[in-house]
């Protein structure tokens, strides 16, 4: 891959879509599960922020299927691997029992969020 010296103008939605599509490609190529999860989680983060900015629900975090008393535990579970892969300030010597199967669930959620974001642009 050649690195271009020219800049690329990109929206947040474009970035999230590109992250998700690359995560899906890497997933089906059975590439590094940590990298796949990190890209998928980044897409979810951007799409969640966009949804919140438009007053829309976030498919994974705001699901009506999650009882209100369990919502914080649910969100912590969704964010656990992503936060572990992204930060080392609080726990530099920690380790994580990562389950790569959770990444497919994250990609489905980000696909739903992307679909919702695209529909809001058309509406």
Image: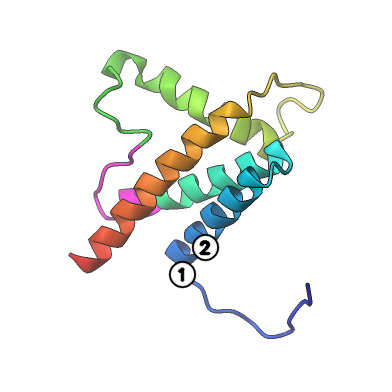
Within 10 Å of the Cα at label 1, are there few (<14), some (14-19), or many (20+) other Cα atoms?
Answer: few
Judging by the rendered image, the residue that carries numbered circle 1 is 11
Residue 72 on image: x %, y %? 40, 21
Residue drawn 43% across the image and 62% down it: 13
Within 10 Å of the Cα at label 2, are there few (<14), some (14-19), or many (20+) other Cα atoms?
Answer: some
2 to 44, vertically: above or below: below
Residue 48 visible in the current orientation = no
78 to 47, vertically: above or below: above
Contact? badges 2 and 1 (CB < 8 Å): yes
53 part of magenta stretch = yes
Judging by the rendered image, the residue that carries numbered circle 2 is 15
| Left/right of residue 17 with respect to residue 93 in the rendered view | left
110 to 19, vertically: above or below: above
| Left/right of residue 15 with respect to residue 114 in the rendered view | right
Asked which secondary structure carries label 1, the reply is loop
Report the quarter where the N terminus lies. bottom right
Magenta-colored span = 49-59
Residue 78 on image: x %, y %? 49, 29
119 part of magenta stretch = no
């Amino acid at each position: 891959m050649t690195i271009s010296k020219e800049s690329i103008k990109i929206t947040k939605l474009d970035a999230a879509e590109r992250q998700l599509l690359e995560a899906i490609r890497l997933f089906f190529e059975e590439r590094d599960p940590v990298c796949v999860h990190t890209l998928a989680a980044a897409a979810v983060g951007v799409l969640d922020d966009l949804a919140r900015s438009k007053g829309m629900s976030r498919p994974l975090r705001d699901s009506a299927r999650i009882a209100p008393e369990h919502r914080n535990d649910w969100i912590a579970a969704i964010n656990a691997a992503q936060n572990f892969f992204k930060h080392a300030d609080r726990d530099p010597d920690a380790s994580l029992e990562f389950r790569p199967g959770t990444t497919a669930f994250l990609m489905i959620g980000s696909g739903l969020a992307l679909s919702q974001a695209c529909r809001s642009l058309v509406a």
